[in-house]
Image (tube, rainbow, N blue to C red):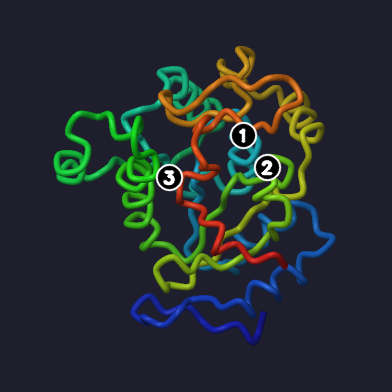
Amino acid sequence: MNEMRPIDRLDTAPRFTDHDAVRLNRMFRGASTREMLEAVIGDGLAGEVATVSSFGAESAVLLHLLACVDPHVPVLFLDTGKHFAETIGYRDTLVARLGLANLQVLAPDPADIAARDETGLRWSYDPDGCCEIRKVRPLAAALSRYDASFTGRKAFQSATRANLPRFEIDTSDGAGRLKINPLIDWDASRIEGYFIEHDLPRHPLVARGFPSIGCEPCTHKVAPGEDPRSGRWKGWDKTECGIHKPGEEPFL
């Protein structure tokens, strides 16, 4: 890492480049998820880092791993105002159970809601616009304070995530932040095994047919054998909320 550009909080140039992401992917090729997290967090390889969590169906795995390494890593949760009540309850359960010491609840700007979604029904005719107001904008503002973020994305979840690397560059605002996908190579059986091994609590909606859980109005049950994310925005040509843009995701 000796060639990697030092992070300067007053510097407006990109913090990381595609070259840095490639080198990090090579550096940790063959390393376990725990080894990678300990190096990134403990050695400060990614600067100031936070994790983004939906407290969804599989979120407990990454949150448990991070809590084992450093429970003070900031956990950013987007409270869209449209979550299932079960998700909010599950969030509180995991925070207490795992000892997560730095939960940060992000909310949409009230002015944006008043101007663009006064009725609260934008999800029903413009789900992209709803996600932009309630997820993309508040998360972008929060991430501006960090050099890197962890995500819970996994390759098996959908075709759009099948070839993602562990390390990539988030170029959405030109800041050159690292986006780190610690579980990208975990499959469903490994996730399930981790839940069992560590006796992690389950999101209550999983047993009711929701393998991928987002906002209540836009999340539907999934039939056995279907893509786990096929219940998200059913009936719309939409597979991501916008905080992970396909155009930003290099296939390294």
In the image, residue 188 lies at what x, y percent? 77, 34
Q: Are marks 2 and 1 in contact (CB under 8 Å)?
A: yes
Numbered tag placed on residue 179 in the rendering: none
Crowdedness near tag 1: few (<14), some (14–19) or many (≥20) residues, C-alpha within 10 Å: many
Amino acid type for the residue under numbered disc 1: Arg
Label 3 crowding class (10 Å Cα cut-off): few <14, some 14-19, many 20+? many
* Residue 147 image point, x, y percent: 47, 66
Q: Which residue is mark 3?
A: 76
- Quarter placement of the N terminus: bottom right
* Within-10-Å neighbours for mark 2: few <14, some 14–19, many 20+: some
- Of residue 48 and residue 81, the one placed in the foreground of this image is 81
Q: Identify the element where label 2 is drawn.
A: loop
- The label shown at residue 158 is 2
- Per the image, the residue denoted by label 1 is 229
Please name the residue shown 49% across and 46% down the image: 52
Please tell me which residue lies in front, 114 or 74.
114
Q: Amino acid at mark 2?
A: Ser
Numbered disc 1: secondary structure = loop
Q: On the rendered structure, is 62 left or right of 14?
A: right
Q: How many marks?
A: 3
The three-letter code of the residue at mark 3 reads: Leu
Q: Earlier in the sequence, mark 3 or mark 1?
A: 3
Determine the residue located farthest toward the right in the rendered image: 30
* Spatial separation of the CA atoms under disc 2 and disc 1: 6 Å
Residue 18 quadrant: bottom right
On screen, residue 1 above or below 81: below
Q: Above or below — where is 95 with respect to 68?
A: above
Mark whose residue sits in front, 2 or 3:
2
Label located before the other in sequence (2 or 3): 3
